[in-house]
Amino acid sequence: MREIRIGSVHFFSLVLMFELGTALVVNVGMEAGRDAWIAIFLGCLVGMLVYTGYNYLFKLYPDLPLSGYTRAILGKPLGAVVVILYAVIFLNGAGRDMRDGSALLVMAALNRTPILIVAAMMILSCGYVLHKGLEVLARTSFIIMVGVLLIGGIITLLMFFSGEMEWSRLQPLLGDGIKPVALSVIRSNYMFPFGEVFCFTMLMPYFGDKKRAVWVVPSAILAAGLIISFTALVNITVLGSDMVERSPFPLLATVSKAALSDFIQRLDVLVVMLLIIGVFFKVAVYYGAAVIAISDLFNLPYRTLIIPSAIIILFSGMLDSRSFVEHLEEGAEMLTFVYPVFTIVIPVVLIIVAAFRNYRSRSRPG
Amino acid sequence: MKKKGQSNQGAPAGGSGNTATRAENQAVLNISNNLEQTLGNIKRELGSSPDLKIRKFQIGSAEPVWVAAVFMDGLINAVAVDEFVMGALFDNSADAAEEMPREPQERLQLILDRALELGEIAVKDDWNDMMLSLLSGNTIILLDGCSKAIEGGTKGGEWRTVAEPSSQIVIRGPKDSFVESIITNIALIRRRIKSPTLWTEFMKIGTVTNTDVALLYMKGRAEDKVVDLVRMRLKKINIEAVLESSYIEQLIQDKLFTPFPTVYNTERPDVAAANLLEGRVVLIVDGTPFVLVVPTVLAQFLQSTDDYTQRFDSATLMRLVRYMSLIILLLGPSVYIALTTFHYEMVPTPMLISLLAQRENVPFPAAIEAMIMEAAFEILREAGTRMPRAVGQTVSIVGALILGTAVVEAGIITPVMVIVVALTGIASFAIPSYNLAVAGRIIRFGFLVAASMFGFYGITLGLIVLIAHINSLESFGTPYLAPLSPFSIRGQKDTLARLPMFTIDLSPEKLGNMNNDNKSGNDQGTSDSGKDGRTGA
């Protein structure tokens, strides 16, 4: 295989598509009520802050993925254990997102298709694209991003012209004080979707232009934060916070209000397409991160791992819970208790150990 | 193989190609000192073919020497042969009465020196070279007592004359097209680019057919890396026969398992010249009017000469129409199926009512209906393509009746489905390049299946996979989606839109710089995709 070099624009689009993922369609930050959009934006800022930590590690080891520098910092045996944990969480992330996406699709559009088939199609497509390589995934994300932004622009224009938006529904701004917003941010908002960029630590070494790399991911997070926040704002102005809170896909309900004369009445299917695209990129990035971690740790060729990983993802995603409600419950708990360990605790430990070593090795000869 | 005599002759003209294998198969033959024996060998090797012509005569008055002129009837230019043979051998001027020299070498030299009538003359001492030269339409002169042969370039014979292109038609633009003769084809390009930087290399491919293949590029504009790659892949070819440029195309293309063409072909000399100016490599194969162009990008298959001969605004419109027809071709029937079977809430109510009313009498599900119609349309198209002209009318009338009216009246297919299928069919004709249209027709069936099983879910996943697939393609080091991904602002001047001529008028220096920029840039070297060089022609 040729050396992988992902260009800045393509990396940006991949991060953006990953971030928008499901977050654009499902309910984010509704604990903050009508101030959800503020909570989302704050979450995005926290996500950027978290990412600076990864950037520090990336600058120390620009040619190694997370699985590489974990072992370099913690030593081989301990590092290997941590990398295995990361591989498991990546596989789990892919499986969970796939389950999320397939369940939503079955609910929204394909109510007579078995969920396993829907999920299998998704994982097959991801596997095909990953087989073509990460560079292809990133370049594909760029073209798809252009399409998604076009769809988004059209929907936004239609919403503005339809006259359904009522700005008064946003008021009073921070009516219940900052507390619910802060709670929402701390519970899950910074993690979903912004903390999830931790899987890009596996892809960073493939970045073509190392100097720009430090800025590209945070700017993509910011762009994603602005878009999701704006979407939440539109949802609230169209539907009101009550309805948004109860709806599983507020954007679907919002978009169905848009109408252009009598012809274009239901654009829901565009939202369903956004959902499919978002789920695809989320699954593909987690899946790719897992495959890289395993191939890096066990020194196995990248392509032979694609099919075994696909099978693990498919069945772990399908078998992790008895029902979709249980699945969501589990997801919420993972966001609060499990993911922070991987996105914050372990990286902080890594940073401290690495900084300490760095300091020692620098002071010794000097 | 043969021991060399004194080497006072000109070097044998190029093209010693793939003769080695032939020598292996048969007993090694030499050009013998004995004329009769050599002529006998030639006859035997060609199986005494009646189109082999041998004229034997004596020259010199005092000590006559037997000489033979050998050529293949039909492959030669009769006038050239007459002049060559007469001029070189029967010199009627005063000093012709002089004695022929005794030494065979000197005789040979004398004949060479006298043959002023021909531009191309050489001495052959290898049997296989000589036979190849004979079969290429040259005239061979053999002297008794001399183990060398003189080859006179008398290639000729009947070729189709330059006519209007038949598959790449334009409203405005040059009306000539390539023919089967490689020499004529090179001349057609040279007439357009009168520059010494247009370089040509010849090679012979095909162990049996020994087909001439010319590799044309503009030194300084084409990337050396690409030229080397093309040359290397051509050298690697091991095939018996090359009867059309598609043989070469299929052996040098980057990827086998893709419906997309990664080698461009054209029968228009102006298109070939424009591509040369853009730094691409052109391959001309003897015996076919279709020349190959590499490297290529997807956008090129949606361009036409008309884009440059019309105003930029109308050219942009035409181009967008083509892109739209590609999308309709790929997605037309599948979107219809997805809408009517999975997402009917998207269809406006009055239209939905009329659709369902139509479907009332039709026994098949929409997916089957679409499959039947698409298959019928493909059959009709295939029949129409290769139909003798006299019966062509029948096909179109019967096709129009069956697929248009009868099938609806019989209650087998809904009228809307007929419209959808007809639209896709027309869309496939709007794509300027036949092989891209075929790719679209193949992929369309994939989308049809995906849509009939999963609705828009299948279409969306299919689109992602399709884009990833196209993204993974490369043509001689150039990414297939080049100006779109990897993205370059400069490339956009002539990809989806065609901006006014002054913006894409790049002087050669700039073009060269641009290639270098791309090489050193962080993305892989992308050659410019547009037809920027056209204005330089």
Image (cartoon, rainbow, N blue to C red):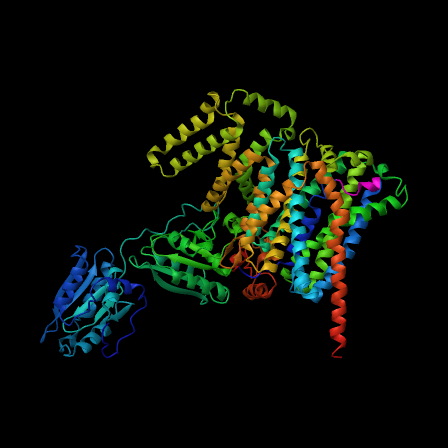
Q: Is residue A30 magenta?
A: yes
Q: Image quadrant for the N terminus of chain B?
A: bottom left
Estimate the x, y position of residue A354 in percent, counting from the top left: 74, 66
Q: Residue furthest front?
A: A77
Residue B488 visible in the shown view:
no
Give the residues drawn in magenta, as a range.
A27-33
Of residues A347 and B447, which is closer to you in this image? A347
| Residue drawn at point x = 79 percent, y = 50 percent | A43
Residue A3 visible in the shown view:
yes
* Quarter of the image where one finds residue B203: bottom left
Of residues B502 and A60, which is closer to you in this image? A60
| Residue drawn at point x = 24 percent, y = 74 percent | B113
Estimate the x, y position of residue B473 in percent, counting from the top left: 52, 53
* Quarter of the image where one finds residue B314: top right
Q: Is residue B38 magenta?
A: no
Q: Is residue A92 left or right of residue B305?
A: right
Of residues A237 and B487, which is closer to you in this image? A237
Total numbered badges shown on the rendered structure: 0
Estimate the x, y position of residue B196 in percent, counting from the top left: 44, 67
Note whether B363 is above or below A56 in the view shown: above
Of residues B15 and A275, which is closer to you in this image? A275
Estimate the x, y position of residue B488 in percent, counting from the top left: 61, 57
Note whether A10 is above or below A64 in the view shown: above
Q: Is residue B59 left or right of residue A79?
A: left
